Image: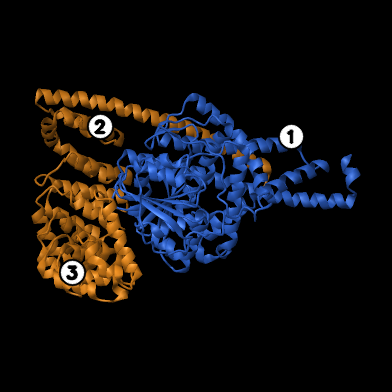
Chain colours: A blue, B orange
Amino acid sequence: MLRNILFNDAAFEFVKVFLEWVEAFFVIYLIGYSTFLFVAVVTGSSSLYKKRRQEKLKNTINRDYFVPISIIVPAFNEEVTIVENVRSLLALDYTLYEIVVVDDGSSDATSQRLIRAFDMKPIRRPIQRKIMCQSEEFIYESVSGKVPLTLIRKKNGGKADSLNMGINACRYPYFICMDADSVLQYDSLSKIVKPVIEDANVVAVGGAVRPANSVQIDRGRVINYKLPSNVLACMQVLEYDRSFLASRILFDKFNGSMIISGAFGLFKKDTVIAAGGYDHSTMGEDMELVVKLHEYCVTNEQPYSIKYATDAVCWSQAPERLIDLCKQRKRWHLGLFQTMLKHRKIFANPKFGAVSFVSYFYFLIYELLSPFIEIFGILTMVLAFLVDLINVPFMLLFFGIYAVFGSILTLTAFFARTQTIDLKISPADTLKAVLLCLFEITLLRFVMAWVRATAFIGYKKKRLNWGRIERKKINLK
Amino acid sequence: MKVEILIYGYLAVCVAMIIFNIVCIFLFRHNDNQIVLYSNEFKNRITRHIKSGTVDDGHAQYLAKKLRRARNLMAFDVTLGELDAEYHDEIKSYIREMTPVFVELTRLYSHKNEIQAAYFPYIIEKYRLFDSENAGVIIDSLYELIKSPSLYSRENALHAVYSIGNSKYVIRALEIVNGNEFYHNKKLITDGLLSFTGDKSELNSLIWEKMDEFSVEMQTALMDYIRFCGGDYDNEMLKRLKSDEYDREIRFSAIRYFGKYHCDDAYEQLVKFVSANDEGNWEYEAIGAFALANYPCERTVDVLKSKLGSRVWYVRFNASQSLERLGLEYADLLDVFDGDDRYAGEMMRYRLDRKKLFAKGET
């Protein structure tokens, strides 16, 4: 009936043909995504099981002094968490490292709290400017802890600028970038350097970032693991396992990682400096750096490899309010857009091999464009409904199967992770994971698609801010 | 293609994944339970034998049969670890009596998949299952593992060889690593050699005999090991320090050696390295400047002061560090602070300020 009112025969025919094309596109699109998801989860899970077996059968190399590491902690208005976090860094199970905190012109007492807590002394330290960054206002040092601690207070310039200052000031050949409100697990450094010991060509290693909401941590050790009581945070735990953990393990198999989280990554200093350091002008400076490293190494014919250490763990607070999650995802999406645009040279470029034809292509279609494609899909469903060209029961069945498929893969990734690192999951948490994974894939995913699709509205205004969200303190004992 | 087929395909994958998850959960639990079970069983049997003072053939056969499975070997590892703490001497003689079993297992595990293959050499090293006298029969199996593409197999096998304590075996193992196509971090070699349980001076002599046959990477690893071992090799190191026929990495290693062990004969060459203003080879200057801290005299101070104005950051940094290590104070460095070179003054002042502030701290 509605069809007759809205469309004449010619228009109806056009819509029919249009919908047939849309259907064909979505069949291919979904087969592609489902296959990727399946391969990623199977590869990720089997890698985790293999790693567990290797650990049990002593296929390990734990040396805490082979690779000297500088930990760079960029901080902006972190007075609440900074002291506790530096304390947790000082308690890491590693011998040869230093900590460099870069205060990016905070308006609170971030620097003062550190100075007081660690008996830091002012010093005029020359810094070799290998990468451009804002100038320092003062420098403090302390050797009262297990390893040297440096505080550099500089003019405000953003997170990338702070990291560049840290790179200029740090002494060791490898550096770790992390967030000031994250906590590294006690063994994270010895785990993240393993790929460097195993392969001389490693220029970067990504660590595994896990939501710490409701997790109790004592001196870097998890003493009580629970799924977050907050539903939103809990869904993110599941999402992290499926989307980040599994897909990054898969990309790792062919040196195709394009993201190392800004919350925890290890880099070879010389190569990063040669590539130009962090880019001040993008929101996703972490992804931009990794893509830049690919481009730099391939262009200069430098053998390289970018690895992912699934067992090097960093605990970070996931946003618990929807508004904060939206802010975070908008930021990530804009960062992705800027990076893809800046390094478009990689697209369909045979010189870059799998990085171009698998990783870049995946990020373009299934990350950058996916929110638009998904919203377009919903709109065409509405159109098909209006012209009575949709089989509603079949559509619901298809959607249901897709949701179950996604949920089971999510659970597979979740159980693979928790089992392989011997985390005890209570029956209540197991039930929670089973129930929430359905909501995550059906509800949260579409909300996030909308958020990401609208990320570009007003993006120029927030280009260089720190993108702060309300976070709770990590439960440190 | 009909969409229904796609849906059935999805469903099949879902069912397979559910089965996979359930099987994994049960398998893990079952394995953990089995390890506890076998560990208790091994404990009872071994304790019985230790207390009775005799080991019967039946026990050896039982062990040879059970330890073929990696899971049981893990249980055995747990048991031995616990008993070793309580009955150290008895466990030592028990291991000796069980040698035929371990010989068989070494061969067996060397042919298993690479994860399991890496495990047995770990056990060999941990409990010193073999020594120089009885390792001849298994050494070839360890050499085979050193050729493996798996870093863990290679590294565990190397450690097993170091634990045997025979210098010749170690040299042969190093030759195999040297000939391998796989990357083996040189720090692992240096560190591993330090755990060698035999006669180190005999090993070091053999290393020097063979040194030039190894790759540059291996030579620097061995020279670093020698440096950590002790300072009895001035002549060999001097030869490398002075001759430009050697690769620069080898010469850097020699400079570091003389930075640790004072040798009058090396001094002129070190000064020569540091005084050269060759920016293309600034590493000689930088490492040399660091080494000169071990040669306190007026000339050293003058050479290092002249390097505070170097265009290369690392040279300035190391020169200032060495001047600080030589014990110079503000008054001794007035010419640097009053000079035209701002960078030299800044670097030196930083070192001295730091030393003053953290009198008890690190370097």
On the picture, is B192 further left or further right than B202? right
Decide: marks 3, 2 in contact (CB < 8 A)? Answer: no
Label pair 2/1, CB-CB below 8 angstroms: no
Q: Is residue A41 visible?
A: yes
Residue B270, compared with residue A305, is above or below; it is below
Residue at numbered disc 1: A393
Q: Nearer the viewer, residue B53 or B183?
A: B183
The residue at which mark 2 appears reads as B78
Query: Above or below — where is A461 with respect to A442?
Result: below
Separation (CA) of disc 3 from disc 1? 89 Å
Q: Which of the marked residues, 3 or 2, is nearer the chain's N terminus?
A: 2
Q: Callout 2: helix, strand or loop?
A: helix
Task: Residue type at mark 1: give it.
Answer: Pro
Identify the disc placed on residue B300: 3
Q: Nearer the viewer, residue A203 or B347?
A: B347
User: Badge 1, how many Cα within 10 Å: few under 14, some, many 20+?
Assistant: few
Location of the N terminus of chain A (image quadrant): top right
- The location of residue A476, given as percent across then percent down, is 42, 34
Q: Is residue A178 left or right of residue B357?
A: right
Mark 1, chain letter? A
Is label 3 in a helix, a strand or a loop? helix
Percent of width and height locating residue A79: 47, 42
Q: CA distance from mark 2 to mark 1?
A: 58 Å
Residue B118 place in picture, x, y as percent: 28, 45
Nearer the camera: disc 3 or disc 2: 3
